[in-house]
Every structure is written in C-alpha cells, then in structure tokens.
Image: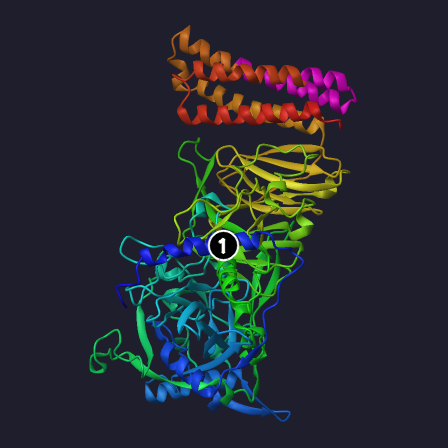
Amino acid sequence: MTDDLTLDRRTLLAAVGSAGTASIAGCSFTQRESDSETTATDESLARELAERFAPTLYFDAAESWLPTDPRPYTSQQDGSTIVDGFDALDGYHERYDSTEEPPNPTVFYNAVEYEDSPLAVVQFWLYSAFDQFTTNFHWHDWETLHVFVDTDTDEPQLFVASSHSRAVPNNEFLDPDPETVPRLLSELGSHSSALSINDELDAFQRLPSPDLLADITNSAVTTLQDIAELPLAYGLPRDEGARLPYLVPEYEGTPIYEHERLPNVERESLVPPALTVRSFDSLSSPPTDLPPRATGVIFRHQTQRGDDTGSEDDASPNEHAYELVPTSEIEHIVDFTGPQLSFEFAIPEFAEDAFASHITTTGAPWGQPRYENPAADITDPTHRSALADRYDAIGDAAPINTVVSRVTEAVTADDAPEGEGLATQETSVEAVALLESEPEAVPTFHGVAVARDVEAGEHRLTVNAAGQAPHSERIAVGESATNTAETADETTAGSATRETTERAESSTATMQSTTAETNPTAEASNTPNGDTVQAPGERITIGGVGGEIPLVARENARKLEVDADGTDADLTDLAVEDDFAGRLYESPLSGSDAVYVHRDGAYTTEVRDADGAIGAFRVNPDPEDDAGVRIERPTTGKASLAEFVASVAGETQAELQELADSDIGSVLEEGGQANALQGLLTAFGAVVEAATRAAENARGGDRAGADQQLQAAEGALDRLAEQIEAAADVVPDPLQNAARNRVDQARQRASQAQRLEKL
C-alpha cells in the first residue's frame, strides 16, 4: 500500500460524484443507454490482468466452504456435464477431512474488453460447495470480483465485489490506487465479498477516518435522516459489530447433515452452534451472545504471497496458495444442480399467521448477463455514471426502483407511565426482508433493508428477525406508487385529497457521494409510507413510517387484529400510533389484517375507507394476557372518532381519579394543588360528556348536534393544556406526559370528525 492512497487523492471524486448524479438526474425511467458488446481478451492479456489483480482472500475463522475447483464433483446428466449439490458438498468434506487442508484452492478468472474502447474487465469467480446464511441456503455458491481497467493508461477504474444477490448493493470502490491489489473479506457461510482497500488488512471500514480511507466509495441515499451518511453497500455486518444469527439448513424437514447422501457431512461441518439458532420464532427475544467475526484462513495467489506479511516464509500457517484458472476450462459444465432449500417467512395475518417461502438458487456464471457484460453488476449509480462519462462503451445509469427502510426495536419508554408508552431504538440484531413478489430475501446492514431493481407495482414487504415478531405491510413501488411526474419536487407527502393525520417526521431523498464533503446533490420531498421519491439514478420507495419499521420481541408481542367484516365500509388503510413513540405502522388494507404491537404500548388504531372517512379506536393490551386484541367493528365517520375522543379522555380521567383517591391525593391541602387536580378531573369529564353526546347524535343522524358537541369537546381540550400545567406539582411527570400526548391526539380526532361528511 503506497502513501499516495490518501483522502486528498480522493477529493477528485467530488467532481466525479457531481457529474455522475447530474447526468443521471435527467434519465427517463423507461429508457436506458445500452452498453457496448464485449469480446474475450486475448489469453496473454487476460493472464496478465488476472495475475496483477489476483485478490487476497480473508475468510472467517468458522468458515467451512472455501473456494475450490468443482471439476472433481462433475457427473453426466442427459449427455451434459453437471455438478450435483449432494456430490459436491459430500465430496468436498470427504477431501477436507482426509487431508485437513482446503481441497483444491482455486480462483477462476475471465477477461473481456468492450468494443472500440480501452476499457477491459478481469473477473474473478470463486466457487464454494455450499451456502449457509441466516435465511439463505443453497447448494453451490459463486461469488465474483470485477476489476475494470483502462488498457491505455494501465490504471484500474473500479472494483466491484458481489454481495448476495442483484437486489443487495454490492461493495464497490471507484478509482483505486494503481498499485492496489484488491483484498476480499468473505462473509461467513454466504461468502458475500466485502472489499478491503485501506491499511487495515482484514477489517472492513465503511466510512473514512482521519487516518484511513473507507473500503468502499458507494453513495449514500439520504432518504432516511438517520442513515443519511451511510453508504449503501452491504459491507460486512459481523465485522461492523452487528449480530447475525444463522439457521441450520433443512431438506424435507430434516437437517441436511442427516441426509443419507451426505455421509461425510456432520453438524460440525456447518456454521458453529454458537452462531446458530434453531429458528427465528423459537426465541422469545433477540439473541445477545453471538460471537464476533475473527479471521481464519487466508488465500493468496503465488504472485501475491508475502505482500502483506513480509517474505513468503513469514506467511501465516493459515495461509494457502490458490491456483488461477481461466473459466474457459470449466465452461463445459452446463449446470449446478440440487433440490430446493427454502426458508419460510412468517407473515402477520388475521386469525393465524401465514408463511411465504423464500428460495435461492445458483447457476453457472457463464449463463449470467454480468459474465459477458460486467457493467451489469455495478449497483452504485454514481459509479456507473462515472464510467459512462469516461467511456462511450458504458451506458448511463439505468434508473431503477429501490425500496429502503430502517429496522428498529420497540421498547418501553422511560418517560411514560408503566405499561403505557413506547420508544424505538437501534436494532440489536440484523433482520431479513422479503418482497412477496421477489424470490430472494435481502439481509439488513446497520439495520437498513435495501431491495434494488424492484419491479413497479403492488408489493407486500415482510420483515423477520430472530426472536422478534414479524412485520408485514403493503407498498406500491415505482410508477404505480404515485401519479406525479418523475421529479422529486413534484412528489408530495400523500394525496391532496387525503385527510392525513400528523405522521412521523417526513424524510427527504437525495443521493450523494460519500467520498466528497459536499451538500446533497438533489433535493426531494416529504415521503410517508409507501410513497416514492426520485433520487439521482433511483426511484426510492420508503417502507415503514418515515422509513422506520419497529419490530417487537416475541415475549412482548401481542397481535392487534382488525376485522374488516365488522363494518360495511370499504376499508383501505390501517395505521397504529403509540402515545409516546408516535406512528409505528401504516399500510394499505385489503380485508381483515393484523399487526404485532408491544404489550406495554397505549395505541390509537386508525382505519380509513374508500370515501376518505376515518375511524379511530383505543387499544390498551393487557401486559399479563398473552391474547391479542381484536377490533371487531372498525367503523368510520363522526361517531367513531367521537367515541375515540370519549374513550381516551375517560382513560386519562380514570388514571387521575386513581391518583386523587391514593395516598397522594389524601394529603393534598384544600385549595391550590387539590383544586388543580380536581380541575383536571372536571375538564376531562367535560370532554367525555361532550364526545359521548357527539357520538350519540352522529349515530342518530343529527349532524348539527354532533358537530356542536364536537366543538364543545375541542374547546375543552384546548383549555386542558393550561390545566395540566397548573397541576404539574401534584401529577407525576409520566402521567403529565401521557395526558399531554392524549390531549393532542384527541384534539386532532375531534377536528377530523367535524370535517367529515360521514356520520
């Protein structure tokens, strides 16, 4: 590593990032410039590039499936050469166990050059016999590193290391130092490849520090304020302090190591038990004792051996030399086969939860578009745009639909009465997200779920995590999500005809290069759940509320069900708010549905119908009762909202009365404090009385009478703020906080009720 690889050298990327995003911003979402055709480089150049950039590979200390040569495990099927999953997995472990050395360490390479361009790419393909991830199991595994090189200047332009699937943003580095030999940090079990560029050889660094470059130059989508500076690349979560539990893969309901065709595969052949859970739903809370990542085996090509360790003689005993083999020698293998292994996602539904299968497969690299066109694997739009600016052979970034959300945890709030309020905090364990229309799940990194290249249309987004209840919501992606033009300025916070409640803080969407200390390059608009904004190169759909999806530990989860059959209204939307945490859930509604909530929350459940009318219902789960809560008559209109106002005011009045009847109330002197408390009780009682009469009038068809009583209730609520303050010396802080929050909620609903036409 040379001293030239400094942050100062990277300042040029500010210009690159700005130029790239400017060119992307004008793209149509229905058009894309195509890349030029590629041809194979001549063998001598291919070998030269392969040896020059042959990566050093660092593996987790618990890794079993190291890059190998699949040819010993080939067989014939219908006259074609294949690699059967059982044969490869069992044969690999038979060889490993007999020699106690990694079998046939091999890295394959392929090199292509774009027509009429100096841009060439050398690809490194790594084959593993099996993939075991948190929810991702499949026979065989192919990972790749693309090195884009300008053959005129002899300088590398871009490194792209593959991460899971096309839906997950790859780890990429633009304009590496010409002397840099890439290093790959392989994720345990999945073999997703993180880049290591700086002087910390076997560690991943997402953001730059005063002394070190970041290991990626991926852009940040500032769609969510909390991750506004987080580069969107998968990275290496366990190396970044994340907890990532693994599952034991099963075939036909039995752990694979018990299968009769795998006599050489034992439980010890898989990811160790210390990192493994039996199933996500078998835990009552997220695991907290998962061991961190540590480096184990290192693979180097003989041309690189000793580069990081001094002489070859000083190399670690865990270090092994690998063979560099052109992929042309194995292109006769037509398929990598094996029976499907799947993971079932839990989906909250009315009555009983449903399950959706998540299935992953792998195939031969030479059947994939990125094999002939490596630019197809560039996932960061600013990187693609930078190459497009330099080379006519590379088309400008293809704008795509991306779903982004941040997974958090719902916990009890310190400033709320016991069992009556929540807060959200960073997740303690990584989760996995599945779009029902997509075959593969995406893992989170830093709690962020990103699904790229999603087809436009209606989708169901489901999130599962170990020890936590599942979350599911419906979202509209792409053009179906909004009728506005394709500019961020024209995307508004919800429909103008919708009477929205005050939602969680809105987010903005822009994309900026994290290598440049500049302001965001594009402005965007407020984005409630499921709405879409355009950032440069991407149309971003926000999942959750303001981008946040709070999960609940299973031991604290209670199912909240909404029975759509209990009303004649055509219900279209469902939302849930906590008195302290605010809005936690919102989703389009189609028939009866359910959502998991924390047992210690105090909730306002809102429904909306096709005519825009709103209904609200008070929900207070019993912390001691495992049973869920069902709203059996989710009606909409003035009566529903008035009944809610009466309910939440009555609930608060009852708690204040309990305080007045307690030892505290008995020692209050007449006058002052006692009068303040009694004034509060009277004021809340007035709200209850007026709201109850409003509901009765609405049910009886008396619109004028209902509105008159709602106005009275709203007036009493307006006066309550001062009365709560006057009683501050006698009412405990948590109850004061709850009373203020509930008054705000009740005032909002009383105002909505007066504007509604529906009784």
Residue pictured at 41% horizontal, 8% vertical:
672
Is residue 317 shown to the viewer in this render? yes
Mark 1 residue type: Ala
- Quarter of the picture holding the N terminus: bottom left
Position of residue 322 in the picture relative to residue 411 (left or right)? left
Colour convention: rainbow
- Residue furthest to the right in view is 701
Q: Is the magenta stretch mostly helix, strand or loop?
A: helix
- Residue furthest to the top in view is 671
Residue 685: say if magenta.
yes
**Quadrant of residue 68 in the image?**
bottom left
Q: Is residue 172 above or below residue 142?
A: above
Residue wearing tag 1:
19
Q: In this view, does 548 lie above or below 269?
A: above
- Quarter of the picture holding the C terminus: top right
Is residue 287 shown to the viewer in this render? no
Percent position of residue 697, x then y: 74, 20
| Magenta stretch bounds | 682-709
Residue 286: say if magenta.
no
**Residue nearer the viewer, 242 or 42:** 42
Under tag 1, what secondary structure?
helix
**Residue nearer the viewer, 124 or 189:** 124
